[in-house]
Image: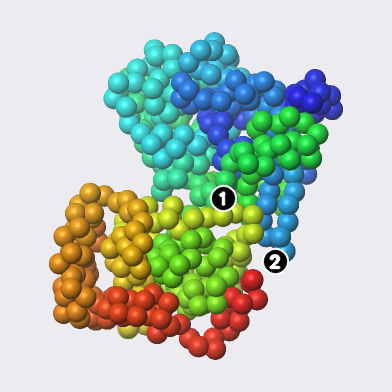
């Protein structure tokens, strides 16, 4: 049976109060799922009009199903594997502004519109000097938003209650601030006037957000079984993990208008999201980047398998609990609880997260995600963190591109690839030659923003670990930095 509002006669309809730029898997499995929960649990009574942000997209499929679909959550809840479906009916319609500009114009002038949500990819919030006010539509997302707001400003004669609240979900730091900066820049370039600029400043809110949920997307391998289970030919099914977190930096009045916490959701409104971002980057992303080379060169290809391995799982836990958490702001109880939730996700039996995908551009990731923890630990503890330092040596070993006669793909910026292409052939495996390689990598100020050879004892430690890795292999070398008999080793065993 097809899935649409004819076949599902009792599907609720809500007033369009939200305009969403982006029809992809993440927004439908995260934001729209949250809105549906709010509608179901606290009668939020909000429908969504979805705008296709690019000329090519899947709005036609959204409209074919009248915006109806299912989110299929698979993951860990309270330590146990769970699966559940959520029927989503909060999407009212999809709009392609490139072919239906009048429909798009009607949506942005809707007097009930209050929120704008976006996920236009990291490249979406960008400056395009070629955008003009009279374009239908503008090329860039900031250009579209500027024109959208100006049209509302004129249509409602500058009424303060017709301003909009923006929740930008693009994966860039300070995403709301950047969008607002470009909107004001367009307003100045287009000579839209001080009165309009003041309205943008006072009647609108551009919230910085941090989003977190793994969304594998459309389950093409299992879709027939899933459709049979649902009883509908749903071609918009989207799979996501059970865990979700949305941190929104905005004024208190925004939190009152979007009370997601009252629906039992992990949506946090904060005055400053810096601490939350640092925690997420250091723990979740930092554990991934700090563990990928150790795991892969130990013969383990996925996150879950690494987490369940006694030695590598212990390495991951000791790195996070004994090193990373020590340099983050927050109480020990709060940070431990956060890390517990993050690491629980690594054991998700339904998601196969490949280390080789995490390895892409790993050097720049390590600089962002792991180096601050290393330097913070040195400053606080007066010594190097063993596991984090070992992870740096492991990453250098990974960039050799070969282990036990097996080659694997490496992808990074060309200047980094060129460095290793020269450094590894010049290394004969001796301690002195290994140290020379390490010195070259640590001296790469273009990447590290400093000469890391100046960090006390770092060159010697990394060189020693890298020499060990070459001499005895990753599994044996790793034993020197994990604690035999540590409770984390037992935890890794019990995770299997």
The picture places residue 465, in percent across and down from the top left corner, at 31, 79
Tag shown at residue 214 = 1
Q: Is residue 195 left or right of residue 333?
A: left
Closer to the camera in the image, 301 or 491 = 301
Q: Quadrant of the C terminus?
A: bottom right
Residue 291, percent from left and from top: 44, 67
Q: Which residue appears farthest toward the front when viewing the image?
A: 405
Residues under labels 2 and 1: Cα distance? 17 Å
Q: Is residue 290 visible?
A: no
Dot 2: within a 10 Å radius of its alpha carbon, few (fewer than 14), some, or many (20 or more) residues? few
As rendered, which of 254 and 69 lies closer to the eye?
Answer: 69
Question: Circle 1 sits in a helix, a strand or a loop, which is it?
Answer: loop
Q: Which residue is mark 2?
A: 79
- Find residue 319 and report its horizontal and vertical position in percent: 45, 74
- What residue appears at the point 18 percent right and 73 percent down from the top-left corner? 428
Viewer-proximal residue among 429 and 480: 429
């Amino acid at each position: 049976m097809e899935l649409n509002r004819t076949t599902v006669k009792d599907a609720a309809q809500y007033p369009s109060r939200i305009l969403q730029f982006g029809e992809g898997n993440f927004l439908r499995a995260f934001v729209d799922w949250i809105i549906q929960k709010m509608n179901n649990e606290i009668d939020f009574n909000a429908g969504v009009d979805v705008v296709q942000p690019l000329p090519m997209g899947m709005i036609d499929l959204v409209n074919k199903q009248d915006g109806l679909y299912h989110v299929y959550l698979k993951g860990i809840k309270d330590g146990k594997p769970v699966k559940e479906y959520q029927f989503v009916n909060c999407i009212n319609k999809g709009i392609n502004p490139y072919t239906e500009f009048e429909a798009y114009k009607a949506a942005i002038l809707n007097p009930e519109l209050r929120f704008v949500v976006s996920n236009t990819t990291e490249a979406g919030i960008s400056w395009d000097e070629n955008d003009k006010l009279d374009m239908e539509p503008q090329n860039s997302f900031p250009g579209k938003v500027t024109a959208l707001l100006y049209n509302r400003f004129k249509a409602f004669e500058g009424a303060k209650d017709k301003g909009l609240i923006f929740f930008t979900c693009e994966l860039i730091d300070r995403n709301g601030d950047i969008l607002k900066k470009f909107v004001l820049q367009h307003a100045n370039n287009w000579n839209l006037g001080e009165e309009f600029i003041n309205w943008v400043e006072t009647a609108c809110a551009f919230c910085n957000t941090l989003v977190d949920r793994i969304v594998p997307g459309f389950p093409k391998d299992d879709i027939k079984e899933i459709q049979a289970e649902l009883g509908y030919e749903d071609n918009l099914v989207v799979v996501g993990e059970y865990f979700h977190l949305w941190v929104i930096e905005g004024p208190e009045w925004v939190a009152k208008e979007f009370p997601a916490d009252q629906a039992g959701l992990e949506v946090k409104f904060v005055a400053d999201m810096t601490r939350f971002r640092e925690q997420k980057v250091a723990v979740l992303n930092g554990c991934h980047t700090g563990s990928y080379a150790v795991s892969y060169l130990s013969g383990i290809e996925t996150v879950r398998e690494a987490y369940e391995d006694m030695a590598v799982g212990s390495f991951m836990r000791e790195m996070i609990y004994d090193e990373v958490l020590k340099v983050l702001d927050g109480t020990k109880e709060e940070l431990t609880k956060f890390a517990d939730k993050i690491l629980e996700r690594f054991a998700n039996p339904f998601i196969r997260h490949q280390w080789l995908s995490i390895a892409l551009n790993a050097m720049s990731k390590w600089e962002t995600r792991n180096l601050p923890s290393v330097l913070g630990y040195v400053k606080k503890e007066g010594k190097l963190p063993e596991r984090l330092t070992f992870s740096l040596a492991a990453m250098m070993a990974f960039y050799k591109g070969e282990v036990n006669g097996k080659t694997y793909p490496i992808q990074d910026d060309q200047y980094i690839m060129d460095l290793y292409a020269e450094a590894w052939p010049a290394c004969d495996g001796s301690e002195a030659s290994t140290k020379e390689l390490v010195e070259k990598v640590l001296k790469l100020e273009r990447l590290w923003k400093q000469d890391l050879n100046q960090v006390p004892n770092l060159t010697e430690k990394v060189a020693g670990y890298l020499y060990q890795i070459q001499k005895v292999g990753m599994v044996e070398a790793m034993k020197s930095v994990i604690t035999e008999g540590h409770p984390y080793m037992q935890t890794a065993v019990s995770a299997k």
